[in-house]
Image (cartoon, rainbow, N blue to C red):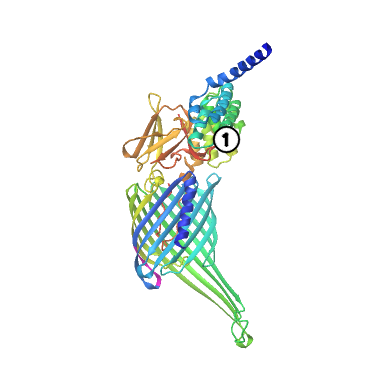
Amino acid sequence: MRPISACALLSLLAGIAGSAQGQVTALVDIGVRDAPVGALGTRSLWAVAPSLHYDRANLRLDADGEYRDYGRLGRGLSGGLDGSYFVPIAGAVRGEAVATLRGAGGGPNSSAGLWNAGARLHLGGRASGLWLGSQAGGGTEGQSLQWEAAAWRRLGNLTLQLQGSQLTLVDRVLRDGVAPDTLTPRPDTLYRDQARVTTDLAAWLQWTPPRTRLALAVGRRYGITEVAGLISGAPQDGGLGQGAGQRATTSTWWLVEATYWLAPRWGLTGSAGQRPPDSQLHSPGGRFLQLAIRTALGRGSRAGHAVPGDQRSELRTRRLAGGAVELLLLARDASRVELRGDFTDWRAVELERRGGGVWRLRQAIAAGMHTLTVRYDGGPWVPPPATRVTTDEFGQETGVLVIE
Amino acid sequence: MPTDRSFHLRRLWLLATLAAPALSAQEPRLAARLSPGTALEVQHLVDSATRAALPAEPLIQKALEGESKGADSARIVGAVEALLQRLRIARRSLGSGATEPELVAAAAALRAGASPVTLGALRSLRPDQSLVVPLSVLADIIAAGVTPEQAWSSVRDMANTGAGDAAFLALRDRLTNTPRAADALPPEARRPPTEAPPASRPVRP
């Protein structure tokens, strides 16, 4: 993927994000890495990796890219777009439409690209669940079909996920009349049918206390490559020739990744592990170690529920003795929180900062159902946590809250 | 000539009679926040609600909400008109004794997809208790993806037991399993690490 393409994709996503209500998070990692580059062994490289994430209720869009400098081996670029949209089906069953577009090129590795689109069926709630899914796609390595299944469980800040998937890549080559204009006996038909089946089993563990994120993963990859070939040539050359072969490989991979936010916009991140070879993106397997500085950019990237490490946003209300209502909102990393609703004449009211990341508003509010939105550090207006989210008559998301 | 003069006087008096109440009762918040034309149209809807003994404040708040969210005049008037219509249906379904919070909650339930018939049925099941929480729970359950019929069936069964508001809230938590749909999104499908950074995306809230 050329740099201009990656920039255009990021700009497009930024445009979509800017035109709609939602939470935008922009991150940039700048760091160094020790990583294998195929037959050339391990090389040190430095990389800049921007990413843009957009969340709106059940919609999520992610764009990420990475520029790598291998020194004398050249420069590489990779990037991708991921989209996910959830739709309720019935009760605890939900559907998810997913799509992926990824590409990589430059440096010591050859260029490759892929796209996938598919659907998942989710069953479960807030604490646990499972899903089944299928995706089909294509790319430089042929057509692909993937099946996946996963089960997950959340215990507070801890999430455990067991995941299995099987990817089939089919690459067919058919050439007729290889040498039709010559008397030289050589094959006039070449047919090759190659299927690569990769099965992954993995366990992910993620811990997200405030300001911190720790991810551990271990997986096993089983690969089978089957090649069926057929060559037909002139009769004097022996006629038909054919052959088939199968090769099986297995590899174990693991990953440790940690991020700590030193300040609302600055953090340190590091990861290490052993990665499996990825034939779709021509990525060689091997050990890697990376250290990077992470920065969160943009007005909406800092506070609220989308900030990494701030997973405890919540809203509580209680009626005071004098009849007023006290609203308490937890937003640890925010430096300014505003609220507007049908009890403020839809004018922004600034909340008062209390200790421990708690923000307070005391206001006369009649009992009943109310609608409101909040914003953090001048970002977009979003429904507060722990409210029912509804799309209002103006096409924007609003929180609904009952005050007794 | 005297005939012409009296005709003009009668016409002026008629115009003054029609215009005076509207001008005197103009809601200052509408005049301050909306364009004159929009404020006048919303004011007519507010007056019409007042004449029908319906609450005016929710309509005013809907107009102010539209203004604060940058909606155009047609959308603001349309939203207020639609809310007025739902309040009328809510009044007919719940009866003349319905309070303003009950009417607002009923209008929200109607917008979520509840049937007017269910509102009346709920009133008859809880004649002496507030319907605000049951109606909001009904709207929440429908919004979480449960069909209006199934949602009403659950709320009706709960109301039949004579349960209080806390039981309705527990029912909502049980059926929706979360106070907010986005909070219940499962973790993402994770890829094994490739050459790019293994996990640069922020975690889901």
Height in image: B45 above or below A24? above
Q: Main secondary structure of the magenta part?
A: strand
Chain to which mark 1 belongs? B
* Magenta-highlighted residues: A33-38
Q: Nearer the viewer, residue B12 or B56?
A: B12
Q: Residues within 10 Å of mark 1 (few under 14, many from 20)?
A: few
Q: Name the residue carrying label 1.
A: B74
Q: Is residue A104 visible?
A: yes
* Residue A302 horizontal/vertical position (percent): 38, 46
* Residue A335 horizontal/vertical position (percent): 34, 41
- Quarter of the image for residue A268 reads bottom left
- Label 1, secondary structure: give it: helix
Please check the rendered image and state whether residue A254 is part of the magenta-colored stretch, yes or no: no
* Residue A35 horizontal/vertical position (percent): 36, 66
Q: Tell me the amino acid under the disc marked 1.
A: Ala
Callout count: 1
